[in-house]
Image (cartoon, grey):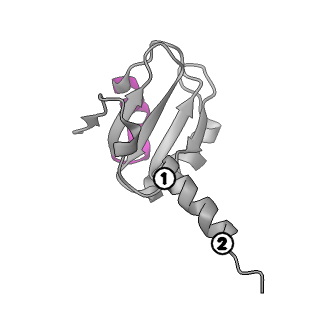
Amino acid sequence: MRVEAYKNNNLDEWEGEYNNLYVKGFPIGTTENELIDEFGKYGLVKKVFVKPGKDFGFVQFSDYKEAEKCMIESRKNTFRGYKLTIELYEKSKQRKFTKTAKSGASSD
């Protein structure tokens, strides 16, 4: 499986609409390749970023359906004996847009 490694730490460049997952709780020292192997069973992994020395990172799937499948199915699994926290990652621009759209309701 060909996977683009996300190496330059610029999270704003992540593409896609709701196909990015924030993953927390894996052992420090976990590699991007280990996450690719783990999450690849849920769909095509496009990018992975692991924060060095931390227990969190990001996984980007090719589309939102694969990310959703991962979130649902991985809840019942562990990774190397650890229960992971997996959440949808929204870029800050998307969060701001969502909040603006929700708060922009008419008060007529």
Q: Are marks 2 and 1 in contact (CB under 8 Å)?
A: no
> Which element type, helix, strand or loop, lies under badge 2?
loop
Q: Looking at this view, is 67 or 11 the one in front?
A: 11
- Where is residue 66 drawn, in percent x and y? 44, 53
**Measuring 36% from the left and 29% from the top, which residue is drawn there?**
9
> In the image, is residue 19 above or below residue 3?
below
Q: Residue furthest left?
A: 2
Q: Over which residues does the magenta segment extend?
A: 33-44
Q: Which residue is mark 1?
A: 93
Is label 1 in a helix, a strand or a loop?
Answer: helix
Type of secondary structure dominating the magenta stretch: helix
Magenta highlight on residue 42: yes
Give the vertical position of 40 relative to 29 (above or below).
below
The residue lying at 64 percent from left, 38 percent from top is: 76
The x and y percentages for residue 71 are 56, 46
User: x and y percent of residue 41 in the render?
Assistant: 41, 41
**Image point (52%, 45%), residue name:** 89
Q: Quadrant of the N terminus?
A: top left
Hey, what amino acid is under mark 2? Answer: Gly
